[in-house]
Amino acid sequence: MERFSLRLPEQVSQTLAARVKALRLDRGWKQATLAERAGVSLASLRRFEASGRASLQHVLLLAFALHRLDDFDALLLPPPASSIAELEAAERKPVRRRGRV
């Protein structure tokens, strides 16, 4: 069963940016402090906090600097198996081979 979301990607990215900003402010850090600790440019951090736009790499670097990188571990996990047959089928998935057979 597919899940349906009422939120758009832009809304999710803006929410994520607001959370990064809140975490930064909770630590009492200026934008320049977080940017330096994360290894991203100050302009990139400012753009992210203002618009939610950033590369995935920058978002991960910011999460790492804020000690929240583990929060990304649960993203895009496969759904849990609903039966023993599904578990057994997952174990038998063929391995892709390179080259000619």
Image: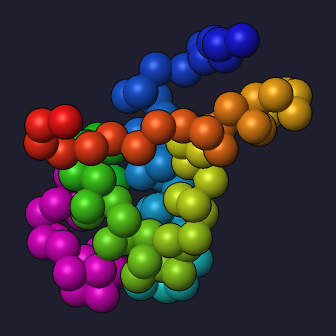
Query: Do we see residue 100 in this rendering?
Result: yes
Q: Is residue 14 magenta?
A: no
The residue most toward the front is: 101
Task: Please tell me whether residue 96 is drawn above or below residue 82 in the rendered image.
Answer: below
In front here: 51 or 94? 94
11 horizontally vs 73: left or right: left
Task: Please tell me whether residue 42 is drawn above or below residue 89 in the rendered image.
Answer: below
Residue range of the region highlighted in magenta in the rendering = 30-48
In front here: 72 or 43? 72
**Residue 6 screen position, x and y as percent:** 60, 14
Q: Is residue 37 magenta?
A: yes
In front here: 58 or 35? 58
Query: Do we see residue 25 in this rendering?
Result: no
Q: Main secondary structure of the magenta part?
A: helix
Task: Please tell me whether residue 87 is drawn above or below residue 86 in the rendered image.
Answer: below
**Residue 61 screen position, x and y as percent:** 32, 72
20 horizontally vs 5: left or right: left
